[in-house]
Image: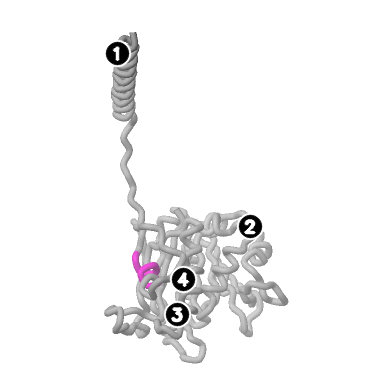
Amino acid sequence: MQGKHSRAGVECRVVAVVVLCCSLLAYSVLATVLLFRQPQTATISFRTRPSYLLSSIEDLFDFITVTTVNCSNSQVIPGSSVLETEDRMISGHEGTYICLDALPETPTQESCRIYSFGINRNDIKFETVMGQRGCRVHLLMANTEYSYSRLKPNVYLYPLELTVSPSLNNYTLDGFLDLLTHMWKPIHYVKTTTRGSEWTFLKTLYLSGYEAYTHVKQIRLLLHLPYATDDHFKDLESLYHLLLGLEYYGYRLVHSRPIPGSIYHIHNLQRHVATKYETVWIRE
């Protein structure tokens, strides 16, 4: 009697195992059929998201020199022949890159808006050319003897300074948007030139209550960096964090070049870097 119960138990276990195996086989066949019935789409590879922690100075230079998107229609508008002066730390005569993909095909004052912060007062050729093409160009320039004026066709000067905290004649990005009634409107190109204007702009962009980072289509930053030494590591790390915000808000690097005269060699990295880079970022 006990032997019969043992055989019955074994048979039940065998049947259970067979049923389980058949179920797994049927599931795998069904999953395979469903997989191949799904439409196949092309895969898009992206650069690995950079780490927030700056482990090496080289990470910063990789981030600002390795482009991640392409522009099918770009142009470099030459600057004036005025050379840089040491006291003002101006750099803009090398020319300005612009990706025309992000601009309307037929620019008008209402369809194309350009902001220029911290400009070189001796070189507004880029702004002049874009004004001639139909864009409405707004220049902020502090410490000038000029009052609000129309400098060229479609080019307007504001004797104001872009700052993180508003005060008399000092405007945040949101304050300037209010002044021009450009809240929630697309800004097609923002240009920074003088030392420090790039970092001030980024801070005001990220703090924008109007979410300007969703409306600014293209940003040209002339980066001014300290020398890449251990003494400046903390400063470089802070600047790296500011630049990482661009990728967080959907901007990608489309153009980068070192400015002539600012290039030097880092022996421990065995590479040439620069204290000034023209970088252009577009929002996808």
- What amino acid is at disc 3? Phe
In terms of sequence position, does the residue under pointer 4 or pointer 1 come before the other?
1
What residue is drawn where x is 64% and y is 69%? 172
In terms of sequence position, does the residue under pointer 4 or pointer 2 come before the other?
2
The tag on residue 233 is 3
Mark 4 vs mark 1, CA separation in Å: 73 Å
Position of residue 265 in the picture relative to residue 170 (left or right)? left
| Label 2–label 3 contact, CB within 8 A | no
The tag on residue 75 is none
The residue pinned by badge 2 equals 210
In terms of sequence position, does the residue under pointer 4 or pointer 3 come before the other?
3
> For numbered disc 1, what is the local secondary structure?
helix
Mark 4 vs mark 3, CA separation in Å: 10 Å
> For numbered disc 2, what is the local secondary structure?
loop
- What amino acid is at disc 4? Tyr
Q: Position of residue 276 (x, y in %)?
A: 41, 79
The residue pinned by badge 1 equals 7
What residue is drawn where x is 65% and y is 59%? 209
> Circle 2: is it few (<14), some (14-19), or many (20+) Cα within 10 Å?
some
Tell us which disc is closer to us: 4 or 1: 1
- What amino acid is at disc 1? Arg
Residue numbers of the magenta segment: 60-66
Return the residue nearer the eye: 61 or 71.
61
Return the residue nearer the eye: 29 or 120.
29
